[in-house]
Image: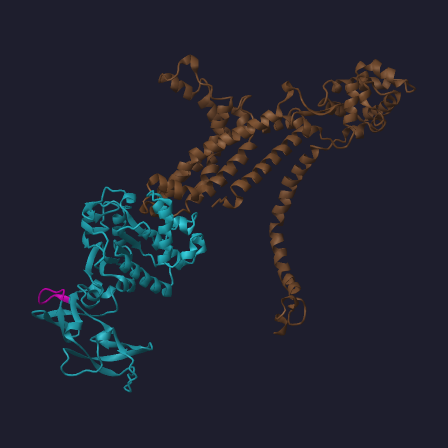
Amino acid sequence: MSNTANAEMLTTQDGKPLKAALSRALFREKMRSLMLIAPLLIFVLLTFVAPIVDMLWRSVENKIVSDTLPETVVVLQEWDPATGEAPDEAAYEALYNDLKIAVAEKTHTRLGSRLNYEKSGISSLFRKTGRRIKRMDEAGPFKEQFLEADGKWGDVEVWQVLKQLSPRFTGGYFLNAVDAEQTPEGIQMKPDEDRIYLFLFGRTLFLSIMITISCLLLGYPIAFLLASLPLRSSNLLMILVLLPFWTSLLVRTSAWKVLLQQQGVINDFLVWIGLISDANRLVMINNQTGTIIAMTHILLPFMILPLYSVMKTISPSYVRAAKSLGANDWIAFWRVYFPQSVPGIGAGAVLVFILSIGYYITPELVGGTSGIFISNRIAYHISSSLNWGLAAALGTLLLVAVLVLFVVYDKIVGIDNVKLG
Amino acid sequence: MAKTRGAAVHYDSVQKSYDGVSLVVKNLNLDIPPGEFLTMLGPSGSGKTTCLMMLAGFEPATHGEIYLNERPINNVPPHKRGIGMVFQNYALFPHMTVAENLAFPLQVRNVGKAEQQEKVKRALEMVELGSFGNRRPAQLSGGQQQRVAVARALVFDPELVLMDEPLGALDKQLREQMQYEIKHIHENLGVTVVYVTHDQTEALTMSDRVAVFNDGVIQQLSTPDDLYEDPQNSFVAQFIGENNKLNGKVVDIQGEECLVELDDGTKLKADKVNVSEVGDRTTLSLRPERVEFDTHDQMDNLVNGQIEELIYLGDHIRVRMNVAGNDEFIVKVRNRGEKRKLTVGETVPVGWALNDCKALDAVV
């Protein structure tokens, strides 16, 4: 056994390096594990990772201008919008050439609606010009003909938008998502009345925190009871906790509509017992209150279950020991039981917070205008305004915000302290 | 026990039922004088732990009253009883260091910082863990955790300490060592200790007195040697130490002696302990080490037995015999290096003194 003397020189009996032999022996095992997870891995890559990457890509991608108007883009590189004058004849000629092809391929309207995000009116400008382009004289002069077709072609701002969006990549969506815009003077915040997204992000954060806190306050005693009851009664209680899970989300949210509206069950009852007058019915739905109530109800199990699974592992003898050492009920709970349940609080809070920050259906149904989340705006841009780039930028910011919060949380609480069971 | 500062405990007709149908503890009357080390010994389900929990205040008594230093404590919550307790799984708070664990009972009593540190230091030194104050319980071995648990139960100078099978999780060697340590701590401090265990060796080693529990009733309450030498009934005889059983019927009673006819007709003289009249069924109890192969005519009892099996155990030889129809009859022979060899199948006379043979209540 002379070859064991030097650890670096370890070899097998026939003189091959031991490490190589070991990895060869483990290779088969590794391949087997890989084969076992392969179906799920492929599924996740195709249906989860790929769409997300594609979506994120859309938030910066911007080749529609340079693809549709290739010549114009080149000519506009020479033009300086700071002069305050529209570009010269060369630009109009290039635009004519590009538009002729675009109209033939019917891509000019798409470009028009894209540019409309930046400056309203461009969509109709392109459609109008598209109809006129066939009648234009190929010999020029083009500037006059364009101005004749629509006076807006003399507007510096229109050209400025075109030049701005010439690059294949743009930060415009992200600027828009944080209520900023690119002006000739550089990046500036939008005028106050046009700002919307930062405020929505703030509200989403605020409401998510409120929902997380309400879930914790309501869920902690239930989880405590669940963990300390004997098995038979705790099973029944557990079924009650899980019952909402087995009911459709829409049904539950609609039920809250019935309960909370001004002519609803709760208001009727309060009026009936005389606590409030008929004229002063409480407004509890289509605002933030409605969102907080309904979402707290929906997300409560996600708080209770991690709490329960952690509390279940806390032996009752700890509290007994604390009491035998002279601690009253409160001190025994606060100094001995509570610190041991903190990992469950961490897990539940992270779960509820992350679920609620991206929640969509419930705020949409009960949130009205003051109770909607950023995700409702994202959905609007995906399905109604079709501004996917902006939707992607908003989604990316949301994702980054969650990740940042997660890192902060890790620094403060420590992710090792999170336990799901 | 001159310098005692322990508390006196008195159970007065205490009964306990969990379901209202059956009694777990049946009419317990028990007096524990100050400074005593009393062990509640019994099989699981015998009610011993329930008795301890009622004393600690974690289970209410269904009937009766418990007195601590003459003061009834049924309505005193656990944290006001001032009783130290060592739990089966130690119950050291995992999120606190050893020193914080020890300081906990002092903090809740509003003891000053300096005094806290002083007491914690002294308690740690008492269990020889002086340098372990900054460790977490999880970083300690089982035996060290055990010592911390003992130190924590003693650090606030209680007059009474309860221990609920504290050595159950330790291996045999450590368990024996801890038995002596706990015994010495008790002797040095003079506190009253109530100790619960199902391990008879532990009970015999450490206790001043042992209460043997079965079926919710104290079967016998005596010193360890009394318990072994003079069991009052068959349960105690079998639970404490090893024991040969011979079933028969009382045919004659002469004062403290009686004559018993075994089921195969053999007649034996026995100490009359738990039989009342002629004709009673009885079980004779006989310790294996009291049976002699060196028989002589003056012996009270002489019987022939056939050797069924010999087991060599070094310091002694275990002989399994068939005596009077009982083929589980065990005799322990001290290994003196004698020339005379026993052989399996041989029939030899064995004998024992009348006082070593107790006529107890009959077991089936």
From the viewer's side, name the closer residue of B180 and A199. B180
Q: How many marks?
A: 0
Which chain is drawn using cyan?
B
Q: Residue furthest right?
A: A139
Name which quarter of the figure residue A238 lies in: top left
Residue A128 drawn at (x, y percent): 79, 17
- Observer-nearest residue: B186 or A161? B186
Q: Write the start and end of the magenta stretch as one range.
A: B273-281
Q: Quadrant of the N terminus of chain B?
A: bottom left
Q: Residue at x 39, y 14 (%)?
A: A277
Q: Is residue A374 above or below residue A332?
A: above
Query: How is colour applied across the structure in the image?
Result: by chain
Work out whether residue B89 can be spotted. no
Q: Is residue A411 magenta?
A: no
Residue in view at x 64 percent, y 59 percent: A27
Majority secondary structure in the magenta region: loop
Is A275 located above or below residue B264 in the figure? above
Q: Colour of chain A?
A: brown
Q: Is residue A416 left or right of residue A87?
A: left
Residue B40 location in percent, x, y?
Answer: 25, 57
Q: Position of residue A288 (x, y in %)?
A: 51, 24
